[in-house]
Amino acid sequence: MRSILHRRITVPVAILATVGLALTGCSSGGGGGSADSGPGDAGEADGVVTMYGTIIDTEEELLNESWAAWEEESGIDIQYESSKEFEAQITIRAQGGNAPDLAIFPQPGLLGDLASRDYIQPAPEGVADNVGEYWTDDWAAYATTDDTLFGAPLMASVKGYVWYHPADFAEWGVEVPETWDELLELTATIQETTGVAPWCAGFDSDAASGWPGTDWVEDLVLRQAGPEVYDQWVNHEIPFDDPAIAEAFDSVGEILLNPDYVNAGYGGVESINSNTFQDVARVIGDGTCALHHQASFYDGFLTDPTNGNTSVGPEEDVWAFLLPPVEADSGQAVTGGGEIVAAFSNDEDTIAVQEYLSSPEWANSRVALGGVISANNGLDPSNASSPVLQDAIGILTDENTTFRFDASDLMPGVVGSGSFFTGIVDWINGKATEDVLSTIESSWPSE
């Protein structure tokens, strides 16, 4: 997520040196301006800052722990509310005048939608200063709409890891693949050797169901069609039903739609949509599943004691390799994700919390607790105790890495967290690729 990432985006970057806000009335508690009035003074400092996001379960506990000492020092109570319905509910809450003080947006496209409709407060000066000092222009662009910075990046992840069991690979006499074709050969070999499906997947995530499948497609678009086509796809310079996107879907289907290859520990292809992405950690941990595609953050789910306290490392229970390129020695291309913290309120307490979350102090506090990384360049890499997270930091900081932010997160919300998600679910349920892509294309907002 930093300056070290190689991504080109058409959104211009303007980091605000100062922020002048017109007084347009206050709301009680949190809540932004309206689409008619535009963002203005909203919220009153009362020692409580409400926050809303998608970070749940163990990760939510660690999030609260990460700022606990700062809360005591500052006297500000951060009240975080998690929801699997965030993508659907945040717009409803903003429109209804019931927005939180702060929201953690996993999709820059969704943030941009609300910012363009004047619900989001421009970033205050301290946040803008931190973004200018600790993030690259690429990362600032993810939080920028119409030349205005609206927030700061929070955490980061490298997507496209394939989780596996090193001991099983040694027993089966197989090696980590170096190309996509070798990955398919590996899959066939494991299936023939064991007689069971090698891959496991879970796409259920309530209102966001389907997103793990979009990650698969994005990885294949980047590896097969290349970064220029990927950028054209994100910016709708080519249609969603372009042949390059159809090819990526069909390539993913060679694994996910093959009943011989999925769904280890659960059943057939149809079970992918009925199992949560979190629960899959259990069948990886107990050895039922041989291969699973998921981002670097999955380390936190695997090592969670409720999933068997699986050890992660090159010589441990589970390790990971990046989804390989189409051609060997063609360079490393990866997709990644992260969150943007943006405000609906602009009282002193909210600004103080927003500034803290954009600082190296918070980044180091959270990364030291495990499970995540940050693209804040004030991060001490040694705080990432997990080998896979250290590996992910190395990938992000490698100047030879071709990096692209998660495509669905950059697309307009109605597509990225809407029709793309539901299209993947329909596709797993048997809808033809051509029909799925046509439906998603028809949902793209007109200019």
Image (tube, rainbow, N blue to C red):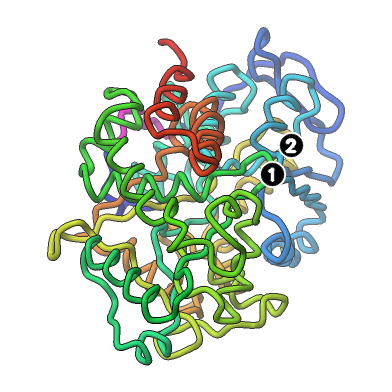
Residue drawn at point x = 70 percent, y = 62 percent: 67
Q: Earlier in the sequence, mark 2 or mark 1?
A: 2
For badge 1, the amino acid type reads Asp
Q: Which mark is residue 101?
A: 2
Residue drawn at point x = 46 percent, y = 22 percent: 439
- Residue 93 place in picture, x, y as percent: 76, 27
Residue bounds of the magenta highlight? 9-15
Q: Secondary structure at mark 1?
A: helix
- Residue 311 place in picture, x, y as percent: 55, 85
Whether residue 108 is visible, yes or no, is: no
Whether residue 398 is visible, yes or no, is: yes
- Residue 96 place in picture, x, y as percent: 79, 20
Q: Which residue is mark 1?
A: 206
Relative vertical location of residue 229 with respect to residue 171 in this rendering, above or below:
above
Examine the residues drawn in magenta and state their main secondary structure: loop
For badge 2, the amino acid type reads Asp
Instruction: Classify residue 52 as left or right of residue 115.
Output: right
Q: Which mark is residue 72?
A: none
Q: Secondary structure at mark 2?
A: loop
